[in-house]
Amino acid sequence: MEDAEHLLSRSLAAQARRRLAACAPADLPVDHWMTARFLNAMGIALRDTGNSVGALSAFDRLRDHATTMGAVDVSARATMNMVVCLMNAGRWRQATSLLAHTRSVVHDLDDPALQVEALFWTARVLETRGAGSAALDLARRQVLPASAAVEHQELRIARHVFVARLALNQITIEWDQAQQSLNEAWGLLEPSTCVLRRGQLLTTQALFDLRRGAHGEAKQRFGEAEAVFATGGIVSPHAKSLCRELRLIGKERTR
């Protein structure tokens, strides 16, 4: 169990998934907290390797288990992870409805980090609904300051990458904001930074290069991102989207 959690801390999701899947039913933990840890680890491993349906099931079981235990904070985090899975699966309406319920629960908890998470996914929902400007405003004014106050370095990278991507996808690109957020993210990068955050940063840097017309540099950065994600067996929806965009531009150039 500890081995799988350590692998997940480094975003080596495929390796962690194999470790967890090797557990026979008789080997599963009996202790309530160990069961919660197992379900959480399995949910993350499934989610990050692209199995949103399996991950949703794991987090749903975790939420029910946490409710039985009376662990409101664990239940809220499991529900937040269910929101992520629903969004990754393109089930936006369900994700929005579940997030609205979760925010009311999170509001009553004394957990600043979870409150940042709720703000972040509210901005993500706005993005998917086509309200990119509102999403950027929320992320810039509330998510980034709150993240800087309570979150660790790797999550702060994720928040800056998100803001950079939003800035690059505005009708009128906000170049200064995109560059500033990317600079902040690169500045937070360390040799120990996990695979997921490295890949996300490289993907968004590739998007920046693509938007400014540096197609060759964008392809190179994207190739680096793909290689990084591959080390952990991670499936990134945003990398898939960028890959389609790069292929489309490549086809147009060969006409």
Image (spheres, rainbow, N blue to C red):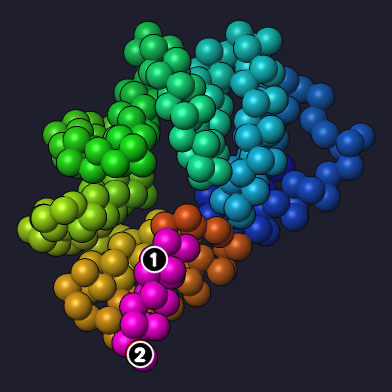
- Tell me if 109 is positioned left or right of 159 in this view: right
Q: What residue is pinned by disc 1?
A: 242
Q: Where is residue 208 shown, x and y percent of the image?
A: 23, 67
Q: Residue at x 48, y 71 (%)?
A: 226
Q: Residue furthest bottom?
A: 254
Q: What residue is pinned by disc 2?
A: 255
Q: Are marks 2 and 1 in contact (CB under 8 Å)?
A: no
Please state, as top left, top right, bottom left or bottom right, where the C terminus lies in the image.
bottom left
Q: Amino acid at mark 2?
A: Arg
The answer to whether residue 17 shows anywhere in this view is yes
Binning the other alpha carbons within 10 Å of mark 1 as few (below 14), some (14 to 19) or many (20 upward) gives some
- Residue 56 or 41: which is nearer the viewer? 56
Q: Residue at x 89, y 36 (%)?
A: 25
Name the main secondary structure of what is drawn in magenta: helix
- Tell me if 84 is positioned left or right of 141 in this view: right
The numbered mark, 2 or 1, whose residue comes first in the sequence reads: 1
The magenta segment is 240-254
Is residue 246 highlighted in magenta?
A: yes
Q: CA distance from mark 2 to mark 1?
A: 20 Å
Binning the other alpha carbons within 10 Å of mark 2 as few (below 14), some (14 to 19) or many (20 upward) gives few
Q: Residue at x 69, y 32 (%)?
A: 57
